[in-house]
Image: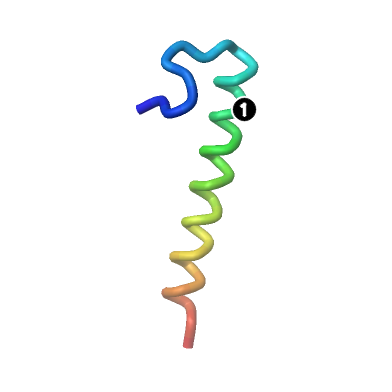
Amino acid sequence: MPVLDPNPQNGQKKLLLVFGTFLAIFVIIGIIATIAAP
């Protein structure tokens, strides 16, 4: 579900993809840290 623009341009879509990937990696690291916590 696009939040910023229903029809984003190439640059905006690429930026959104990079931000989404960074957010996913951050969430995965958080989950791993929670599981690995003593």
In this image, 1 relative to 19: left or right? left
Q: Which amino acid does label 1 sit on?
A: Leu
Looking at the picture, tell me which residue is in the foreground, 36 or 3: 3
Q: Relative to residue 14, is residue 22 depicted above or below?
A: below
Q: Is mark 1 on a helix, strand or loop?
A: helix
Looking at the picture, tell me which residue is in the foreground, 31 or 2: 2
What residue lies at 41% left-to-right and 25% top-to-bottom? 2
User: Quick one: which residue is furthest to the left in this view?
Assistant: 1
Name the residue tied to disc 1: 15
Q: Where is residue 3 in the image (x, y as percent from the top left)?
A: 43, 28
User: Quick one: which residue is furthest to the bottom in this view?
Assistant: 38
Label 1 crowd (10 A; few <14 / some 14-19 / many >=20): few
What residue lies at 57% left-to-right and 11% top-to-bottom? 9
Q: Position of residue 5 (x, y in %)?
A: 47, 19
Q: Position of residue 24 (x, y in %)?
A: 49, 47
- On the image, which quarter does residue 26 sit in? bottom right
Report the number of numbered marks: 1
- On the image, which quarter does residue 12 sit in? top right
- Viewport quadrant of the N terminus: top left
What residue lies at 48% left-to-right and 57% top-to-bottom? 28
Q: Relative to residue 23, is residue 29 depicted above or below?
A: below
| Colour theme | rainbow
Looking at the picture, tell me which residue is in the foreground, 6 or 19: 6
In this image, 11 relative to 27: left or right? right
In this image, 37 relative to 10: left or right? left
What residue lies at 48% left-to-right and 77% top-to-bottom? 36
